[in-house]
Image: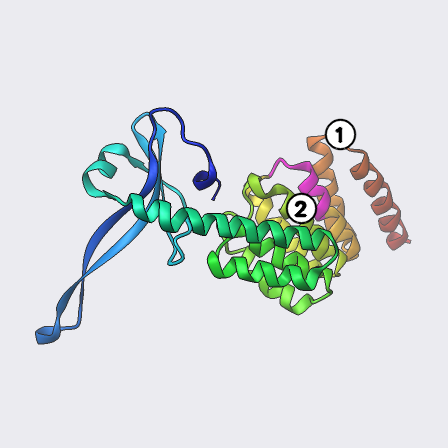
């Protein structure tokens, strides 16, 4: 989404382009060719490459961003300036406005109305990470653990959930899972992120703290040790390590 909202650099183009592909449906005498038109948000990156992202049926850029050679864009894609100006830009602005309202409401302590606005945002872009995080956080604020669990399952499947651009939302969601005693989900959530960022000491600390609250002190000790291997002066991890050592010592008596 940020690509669509950003400014245009001198000499570089951005806009909506379309492609038409033929598909065949039916068999035998009923088989016929159908032409399918697809829209993409394209932004030139430089060095002969462009970023390409599909538009949803609501004309919002969604899904993975691919890199495509400019020559391919020029030879196989058709510019659609009216779709860009009359459909995509208004849709992106509406989504941005809805998300801003939802986030403001949640910060003001209105999780019910925030949930409504996040749901509206997801109607515009059903895979929007900010909206999905926000919906999950609103549900957790209300103590709706079962509904939040459904959102959690969606988040761990979305490709951009653990991207560094979403770090603040990611951390807040993980903390709220733990505070709502959803320890298994919190740990699974952190473990998915750990696969991408194995040298993040704060992530390891959160995994250790979650394991500690699950009273799995051996696993908590392992995560704490890994966090301290990365940063030996990590004060919160040192404090947690001392607590874990006391718990393990009691268990040995």
- Residue at the image position 55 percent from the left and 55 percent from the top: 156
Image height of 131 relative to 150, above or below:
above
Instruction: Please say which color scheme the image uses.
Output: rainbow
What residue is disc 2 on? 171
Numbered mark located on residue 232 in the image: 1
Q: Position of residue 129 (x, y in %)?
A: 54, 51
Label 1 residue SS: loop
Residue 20 shows in the view = yes
Decide if residue 78 is on the left or right side of residue 177. left
Q: CA distance from mark 1 to mark 2?
A: 22 Å
Decide if residue 149 is on the left or right side of residue 205. left
Outermost residue, left direction?
A: 29
Q: Main secondary structure of the magenta part?
A: helix
Residue extent of the magenta highlight: 198-207
Based on the picture, tell me whether residue 251 belongs to the magenta stretch. Answer: no
- Residue at the image position 76 percent from the left and 56 percent from the top: 179
Outermost residue, bottom direction?
A: 29
**Other-residue count near label 2 (Cα within 10 Å), few / some / many at <14 / 14–19 / ≥20:** some
Residue 152 shows in the view = no
Label 2 residue SS: helix
Q: Nearer the viewer, residue 233 or 173?
A: 173
Q: Position of residue 85 (x, y in %)?
A: 36, 45
**Callout 1 touching callout 2 (CB < 8 Å):** no
- Residue 141, by quadrant, is bottom right
Based on the picture, tell me whether residue 202 belongs to the magenta stretch. Answer: yes
The disc, 1 or 2, on the residue closer to the chain's N-terminal end is 2
**Other-residue count near label 1 (Cα within 10 Å), few / some / many at <14 / 14–19 / ≥20:** few
Q: Position of residue 78 (x, y in %)?
A: 23, 44
- Residue at the image position 75 percent from the left and 29 percent from the top: 232
């Amino acid at each position: 989404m940020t690509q669509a909202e950003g400014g245009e650099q001198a000499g570089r183009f951005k806009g909506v382009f379309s492609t038409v592909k033929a598909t065949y449906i039916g068999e035998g005498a009923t088989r016929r060719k159908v032409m399918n038109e697809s829209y993409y948000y394209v932004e030139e990156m430089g060095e002969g490459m462009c970023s390409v992202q599909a538009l949803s049926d609501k004309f919002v850029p969604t899904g993975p961003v691919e890199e495509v050679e400019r020559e391919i864009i020029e030879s196989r894609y058709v510019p659609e300036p009216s779709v860009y100006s009359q459909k995509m830009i208004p849709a992106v602005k509406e989504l941005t406005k809805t998300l801003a309202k939802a986030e403001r409401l949640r910060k003001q302590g209105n999780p019910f109305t925030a949930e409504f606005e996040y749901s509206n945002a997801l109607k515009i872009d059903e895979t929007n990470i900010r909206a999905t995080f926000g919906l999950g956080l609103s549900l957790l604020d209300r103590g709706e653990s079962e509904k939040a669990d459904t959102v959690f399952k969606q988040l761990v499947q979305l490709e951009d959930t653990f991207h560094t651009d979403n770090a603040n939302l990611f951390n807040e969601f993980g903390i709220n899972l733990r505070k709502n005693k959803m320890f298994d989900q919190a740990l699974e959530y952190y473990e998915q992120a750990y696969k991408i960022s194995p040298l993040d000491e704060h992530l390891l600390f959160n995994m250790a703290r979650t394991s500690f609250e699950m009273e799995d002190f051996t696993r908590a000790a392992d995560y704490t040790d890994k966090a301290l291997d990365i940063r030996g002066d990590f004060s919160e991890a040192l404090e947690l390590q001392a607590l874990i050592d006391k718990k393990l010592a009691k268990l040995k008596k």
